[in-house]
Image (cartoon, rainbow, N blue to C red):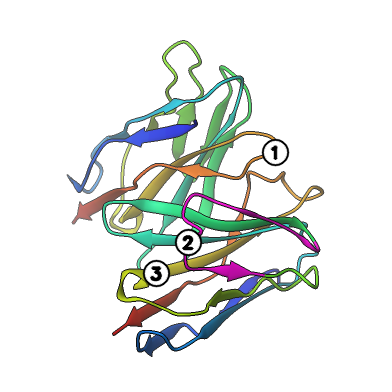
Amino acid sequence: GDSVTQMEGPVTLSEEAFLTINCTYTATGYPSLFWYVQYPGEGLQLLLKATKADDKGSNKGFEATYRKETTSFHLEKGSVQVSDSAVYFCALYHAGNMLTFGGGTRLMVKP
Amino acid sequence: EAQVTQNPRYLITVTGKKLTVTCSQNMNHEYMSWYRQDPGLGLRQIYYSMNVEVTDKGDVPEGYKVSRKEKRNFPLILESPSPNQTSLYFCASSGHRDRGPGTQYFGPGTRLLVL
């Protein structure tokens, strides 16, 4: 079946540092890929998505590129802020099914 | 305002006492689903619904029931709660005409403690 694997956290960075959160997936066919973010005390919200190979999703300075050859969708940001502290979830969607989530990666950004 | 609402937000109950967590969305979405979030396990899907009167099991359906009698509502029922159902529960919805079924809108969560 489908699965998503994320790097374990927490990831602790200083403000303005470069961020990478790794995500790899196992799925047949061509799923759509997503990053969701969960701020403290809130539900998840969509951060970005990519629906086909080589697509790049971007939002709020975050980027991720759908790499079919490496089955990856790594999340990056050039300069993190304290307000980016949250839990980040990688997920995939296959038509006819619902979302499959990774385990989540907690990011903590220190001033 | 487009939103998914859940009630209650916090609930403490005892083993075996039936409870219902309500979920409602105002976006006319076809898809709705329930997840539970546990430390180290991420989000796991409990049940989902593709439309009214159409429901199906997710990854962890044991001990839960759902119904979809109206498009906007998707309640989660625990007939006989047990301590291993202590968790943080999220309802989510998505629609064909919105940004696709993979793009889900989440409610604020319901934190359940079963003693």
- What is the crowding at mark 3: few (fewer than 14 residues within 10 Å), some, or many (at least 20)? some
Q: Residue at x 27, y 58 (%)?
A: B39
Pointer 3 residue: B88
Is A59 inside the magenta-drawn segment? Answer: no
Q: Earlier in the sequence, mark 2 or mark 3?
A: 2
Can you say whether B50 is above or below B6 in the image?
above
Distance between the alpha carbons at the discs numbered 2 and 3: 16 Å
Can you say whether B57 is above or below B86 in the image?
above
Answer with left or right where residue B14 lies relative to residue B25: left
Question: Furthest residue to the top?
Answer: A69
Answer with left or right where residue A76 lies relative to residue A96: left
Can you say whether A9 is above or below B72 in the image?
above
B16 vs A72, nearest the viewer = B16
Q: Residue B26: where, in percent of width, then height?
A: 75, 71
Q: Amino acid at mark 2?
A: Glu
Pointer 2 residue: B62
Residue B44 in view (yes/no): yes
Distance between the alpha carbons at the discs numbered 1 and 3: 26 Å
Distance between the alpha carbons at the discs numbered 2 and 1: 22 Å
- Chain letter for mark 1: A
Pointer 1 residue: A96
- Chain letter for mark 3: B
Q: Residue at x 51, y 15 (%)?
A: A68
Q: Residue at x 44, y 19 (%)?
A: A71
